[in-house]
Amino acid sequence: MEKKNYEKRGFDKDKREEISKESSAHDILPQNEPAKLKLSPSLYDFNDDVYILKLDGNFHQMSRLYALDKLLERDKLREKDGFPRKIKLGKLVKPIKGGGDRTIIIPSIAEEKLYHWKGDYSGGEGSSTGGTGDGQEGDVIGEEPLRPEEGDGQGAGQGKGGQHGLGADAYDIGKILTEQFELPNIKDKGKRTSLTRYTYDLTDKNRGQGQLLDKKATLKRVVKTNLALGNIKINETVDPSTILISPKDRVYRIFSKERDYESKAMVFFVRDYSGSMQGKPTEVVCTQHIYINSWLVYQYKKQVENRFIVHDTEAEEVPDFYTYYNKQVAGGTDVASAYTLVNKIVEDENLARDYNIYIFHGTDGDDWDSRGDKVLPELEKMLSYSNRIGITIAGSGSDYNNTSVEQYIRESKLLEKYPDKLRLDSMRASDADEERIINSIKLLIK
Amino acid sequence: MKLIDQHTKKIMEGCKERAAQAGLKFDKETLEYMVTNSDLVELSPKNMIPTLYDYWVQDIQVLRGKGEYEYYPNNPYETVINTRPVISFYNNNNPDWLNVMIFYHVIAHIDFFQNNKFFTQTWNYDFKEKALADKRLVARLRSTKRRQVDYIIEFAKGIDNLVGYFDTINGHEESKDFKFSERVEYYFDTFLQKIEKVGMNEFLEEVERFNADSDLTDPVREESFLARIRSRYPEFDNLYEKELKERHSASRHDIMQFILEESRFLNQEENKWMKSVVEVIRDTSLYFSPMIRTKTMNEGWASYWHEKLFVNDERIKGHEVAFAKINAGVTALSKVGLNPYAIGWRLFMFIEEMANKGKLSYDFQRIANIEQRKSFDRKTDLGRDFIFHIRENYCDFTFFNRFVDQDFVDKHKLMVVGQRINQQKGVREYYVKSRKAKDFKQMLFDSLYHPPFLVFKKTDDGTLYLNHHFEGQELYREYIPNTLLGIEYLWGNSVKLETTELDYDAMKRKASGSRDNKQVEPIFQRVIYTMKDRKLLKEKVHESEANYAI
């Protein structure tokens, strides 16, 4: 977008500057946060167990959870003794077979010491390492995509690793959050109870009669029978003419009743992925959304479905959490676009009838629509069908609790009008540690 | 966990014989165990020491994702344990020929443990037995003190990278060179210049006066010189004593030891048991210290010997190709990254060749002509002896520092690989940053294990004051609060940490000031963290007050 366009649209000077900066700049400042998995191994990544002794190398990169409950109990005692809790819901980027990696969450404990932070001090330049090969100084010898998901075949169902960190582990994490961090249980699990639906499918097997002959299974039975009869001998050529087929050998597939649970909860995760979100705000929002999802998975006994929406000036639905977490662009911010998309999806798919709908939105509070003219009607529409809308503002500056989004929402009085449905929490992204994030969740969902 | 069978043990014994003939020196007694994966799951949190003390965090911790190494290489547990007898662990379905190679590798490690000077402290005792005694001690204490024991372990582990490892091997050998007495040195170096701030003339006159009394090594005459000083400056002796005290604490690097000795809390009668727990943690850390400081040499040495010995062993017959493949997998230089096997092995071979040709000499260093350098060969044949000397007296730092030169870098086409982000293409690029030996060497140094260096003292009000000597990298901030909390607990009084950090606010201000300049130079700021009554406070230090003195 050109500068004059902004002028035409009536933005004042400060706003124009802010917008043009946001559109062009990536966060130039280094972030004090763990770096992503390193592609190039360092001296201490090599150990005899893997390289020489050929012992299975994976054991020490896995976390074991011995009696998680017991450990959690132990951790609780720490608080009683006046020390901060030690078990964190650490994130771990785990490479998976076939390329790519997935973020998983593992309860973990860091050994906290005074260490040098080997981070990025000069913005963009990562730390140097060694290497070998040809090439002049300055030559590029390799590259890797910044956002690993880009360019890969996308689409629900064929993502990497299947789980994207929001599957099997989520239930456990939800349990930890509920018990360990005392997130509340849902009081009213919603007016809409779970629908149990039955479908019929050709899945059961029956011998002797049925709807569809299962040839492979039948053949196996035939061989079994004839082995028993002695018509087939091992290591000898089989004479088909001697083979007998008993009526009971015929295996059929028959229709059967399958229980099909419907999810009780539909959770929309909406995230601002504009340029200003890069770094810590994104980290905070995504971490919080992982936790919220885990908590819901536990509360709804795994019957939760997720939808992921990212937005800058335009909103887009992405297939999985992995993409949701990693996607970044440097654009402006238009919150209304995302809310409109949520409303459209709910309407088109008639979700309001069958689901308890939760919507969580994470943003840094910037919105070009600074008075909320477009946003507020959409928000009110969302409030009409959802169980809870939680807005997290992870601002970066000192005015983190006075952002455009917060201002127009407070002015709209929607918070007072829907105290049970709409929640808002602002925090300064750079100060948001795990505890702050979890406290914020309590506020959003209680 | 069970011992390897007789057949395999026989292979090991055969390897030992040949290795000893080749000149490796090691204890003949060793123990080899077969381990299963579940054994390994038990062993790895204990750094492969089966008898290490129990600690609940070990049950959950083992999150050693690779990325974490960027911040803190953990104790590099070897699967060969440096005890008497040495213990090593094996997978039980290796073919015999592969075991031959592995055994040579292990034997070379044993040789390294038992001959390298940095391991001196571990030669005198059997760590696994000591660990067992410690484990029992911890268990006994736990039965009465309960989880308090675990807090002590946790807090002690929080500072176990700040032990004075080098002090333990130093031996504090006094220089044999002639020295003036400390008092006289103090008079000239500190007292006159820094306290009295005398002018240049006066200072030189004083030196004249001192020299005029010839043969001042004679203590009687020195006394007379000092007596004159005392009559002139009555406060001299007092100041000297004070300085001496400060110097003493400044020369100490072992915070754990300091806390053990000086902590008001730990030295109370009812808390004395805690000291033995802290000592267990400290000893464990000291035990691992030489390993992490010789990683590259140790792996290079073992790779050198497994290759050399196995290639000349008749048991390789028929497995040459398979060996070549496995060996290459271990010792190939990473295209991007640092492989200690590869670098260490090549450097040992390089040194051997240099020594064989007499290139480690002044004569060679003087030659600038590239052709002459290439053809230089004195045929000294001293290479083998020389690398044995290296394995005895060097650690990774000195190994790299002395021997990585341009010839070595060129020979193996080594380079420093940099990373940068290409916004247009949306990729992270790896590029050839430098092929200069100087840069390569610096990159190696930067990747070596290097705990922060802190100078500490007990202030008059009983606070433990830690002064971090900033070396270009700030401390990992997220871990500071809990670490200081632990130190405060052990110390029994407030703790201050002075360190240097990036000033994000100032950088942000600067960034917003300059529109087109995307890159902002890092701006550093000296700060003081104060941990008092389990509350943390951080404040900025003004430039003039910063206590840089080390």
Image (cartoon, coloured by chain):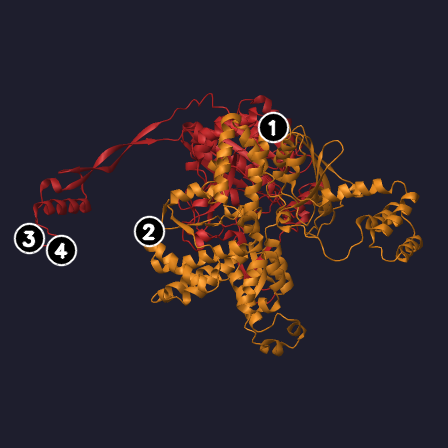
Chain colours: A red, B orange
Can marks 4 and 3 be said to lie on one chain? yes
Can marks 2 and 4 be said to lie on one chain? no
Can marks 3 and 2 be said to lie on one chain? no
- The span from disc 2 to disc 1 (Cα, nearest Å) is 48 Å
On the image, the x and y values in percent for residue B321 come to: 37, 66
- The span from disc 3 to disc 2 (Cα, nearest Å) is 54 Å
Q: What residue did someone put label 2 on?
A: B5
Q: In this rendering, would B74 be left or right of A68?
A: right
Element assignment for label 3: helix
Along the viewing direction, whichever of B129 and A409 lies nearer the viewer? B129
Q: What residue did someone put label 1 on?
A: B271
Q: Quadrant of residue A339?
A: top right
| Pair 1/3: label in front | 1
Q: Quadrant of residue B403?
A: bottom right
The kind of residue on which mark 4 rests is: Asn
| Pair 3/2: label in front | 2
Q: In this rendering, would B161 be left or right of B197?
A: left
Element assignment for label 1: helix
Q: What residue did someone put label 4 on?
A: A235
The kind of residue on which mark 1 rests is: Asn
**Residue at point 73% right, 43% down?**
B248
The kind of residue on which mark 2 rests is: Asp
Q: Chain of mark 1?
A: B
**Residue at point 85% right, 50% down?**
B220
Q: Chain of mark 3?
A: A
Element assignment for label 2: loop
Q: Could you tell which of marks 4 and 3 lies nearer the N-terminus?
A: 4
Q: Chain of mark 4?
A: A
Along the viewing direction, whichever of A333 and B184 lies nearer the viewer? B184
Element assignment for label 4: loop
- The span from disc 4 to disc 3 (Cα, nearest Å) is 18 Å
Q: Could you tell which of marks 2 and 1 lies nearer the N-terminus?
A: 2
